Amino acid sequence: MPDVGEQIAALPLRWDDKGQVRVLMVTSRDTGRWVMPKGWEMDGRKPWHAAEIEALEEAGAKGYISEEVLGTYRYPKILKDGRIVPCVVRVYPMIVSKLLRDWKERKQRTRKWFAPKAAAKRVVEPELSELLMMLHKKPRKHASVRMLMDHID
């Protein structure tokens, strides 16, 4: 395990019937706090593809993921042996096209759609909270989200 961890995350998004953006969060397996689907990079895979796999495994979400990073945040990853590794997480936005009823980690996690502002209040990482608040204010302003929207429209 590296001294500083680099992780990837998917930020699953959808627009509701009123045109408001929603983000899909999952609970962590250890503490049950709300997080985004995330994990370590995978050998031989592009980082956004690894994030897409995490979204499928942790949240049962399928869709279109951006190759462009929406932003980053830091958090202290507590390993099984008790060591703490500072991690930097690159966040890739993903437009959800389908939620599976049965997925790999469904018995270990809860998933729920939130308004970005509500999600921002539930996460403990300040930089992740800021990222979610940016989406609350002007979701289509961000190039990575706009490119995704253009791709699927």
Image: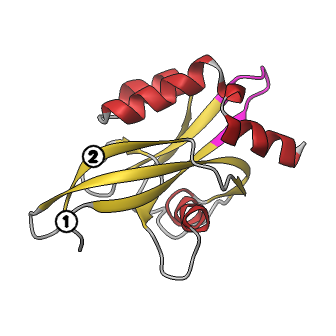
Tag shown at residue 75 = 2
Between marks 2 and 1, how big is the CA–CA gap? 13 Å
Mark 1 residue element: loop
Between 11 and 90, the one lying in front of the other is 90
Image-based side of 139 in relation to 1, left or right: right
Element type at marker 2? strand
Q: Position of residue 48 (x, y in %)?
A: 59, 61
Q: Quadrant of the N terminus?
A: bottom left
Picture layout, residue 31 above or below residue 40: above
Specify start and end residues of the magenta stretch as a single range.
13-21
Residue at the image point whose x is 75% and y is 36% from the top:
146
Q: Earlier in the sequence, mark 2 or mark 1?
A: 1
Can residue 67 be found in the magenta stretch? no
Q: Which residue is mark 1?
A: 3
Residue 89's disc number: none
Lateral position of residue 106 relative to residue 14, left or right: left
Image coords of residue 9 (percent x, y): 49, 54
